[in-house]
Image (cartoon, grey):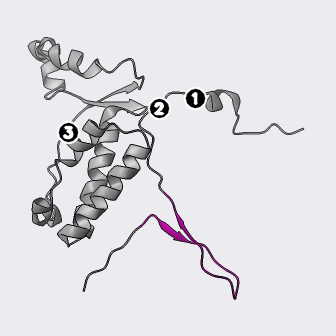
């Protein structure tokens, strides 16, 4: 028996003798948002993998991917970005996607910095200069592998203007 489950459908409660109203919510981020490119790529591939795992019919899977592409295009995603990211997920990979994977535990030291769209070349600079760290004996013991580049959210205008605590009095 085949079940197709859409998590983006939401049913609103109704009064007696009134028809059910069905709303369709698409909550994908717009491409022009200030997210790192890896987040956008990971989100797109992750949604395609979710479709791959939950839909067992090839035609329904292709229909779901086509609907996903149209929603991404409506949110400003470039066609070539969508094609290259979704080409990594094919229906033939379904059996591999359904297998449980053993995670290997690595101790990777994160390099945390505040994200800014103009500073996209932090990782290449760090990787190209990594040999300076490996040449130092003390640093080579501490940093066995290159760090994981991670970004934290910067302070927004809301964070600056709004206080969480109210003063009494």
Question: Which residue is label 1 attached to?
Answer: 156
- Callout 3–callout 2 Cβ contact below 8 Å: no
Mark 1 residue element: loop
Question: Which residue is label 2 attached to?
Answer: 153
Please state the extent of the stretch shown in magenta in the rendering: 7-25
How far is disc 1 from disc 3 in space, using C-alphas? 32 Å
Mark 3 residue element: loop
Residue at horizontal 64%, vertical 32%? 158
How far is disc 3 from disc 2 in space, using C-alphas? 24 Å
Foreground pick, 131 / 99: 99
Quarter containing the C terminus: top right
Indicate whether 150 appears above or below 57. Answer: above
- Callout 2–callout 1 Cβ contact below 8 Å: yes
The answer to whether residue 149 is magenta is no
How far is disc 2 from disc 1 in space, using C-alphas? 8 Å
Question: Where does the image place residue 164, in percent across and percent down from the top left?
Answer: 69, 39
Side (left or right) of 47 relative to 96: right
- Callout 1–callout 3 Cβ contact below 8 Å: no
Question: Which residue is label 3 attached to?
Answer: 107
Mark 2 residue element: loop
Foreground pick, 60 / 140: 60
Indicate whether 24 appears above or below 82. Answer: below
Side (left or right) of 49 relative to 17: left
Task: Locate residue 134: give its quadrant.
Answer: top left
- Of the two numbered discs 1 and 3 on the same chain, state the one appearing first in sequence: 3
Q: Magenta stretch mostly in which secondary structure?
A: loop
Side (left or right) of 168 relative to 109: right
Foreground pick, 44 / 154: 44
The answer to whether residue 9 is magenta is yes
């Amino acid at each position: 028996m085949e079940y197709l489950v859409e998590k983006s459908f939401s049913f609103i409660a109704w009064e007696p003798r009134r028809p059910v109203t069905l709303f369709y919510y698409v909550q994908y981020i717009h491409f022009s948002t200030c997210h790192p490119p890896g987040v956008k790529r990971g989100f797109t591939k992750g949604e395609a993998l979710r479709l791959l795992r939950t839909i067992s019919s090839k035609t329904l899977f292709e229909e779901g991917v086509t609907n996903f592409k149209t929603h991404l295009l409506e949110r400003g995603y470039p066609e070539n970005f969508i094609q290259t990211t979704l080409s990594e997920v094919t229906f033939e990979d379904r059996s591999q996607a359904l297998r449980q994977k053993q995670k290997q535990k690595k101790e990777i030291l994160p390099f945390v910095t505040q994200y800014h769209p103009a500073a996209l070349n932090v990782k290449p600079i760090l990787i190209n200069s990594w040999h300076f760290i490996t040449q130092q004996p003390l640093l080579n013991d501490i940093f066995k592998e290159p760090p994981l580049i991670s970004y934290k959210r910067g302070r927004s205008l809301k964070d600056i203007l709004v206080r969480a605590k109210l003063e009494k009095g």
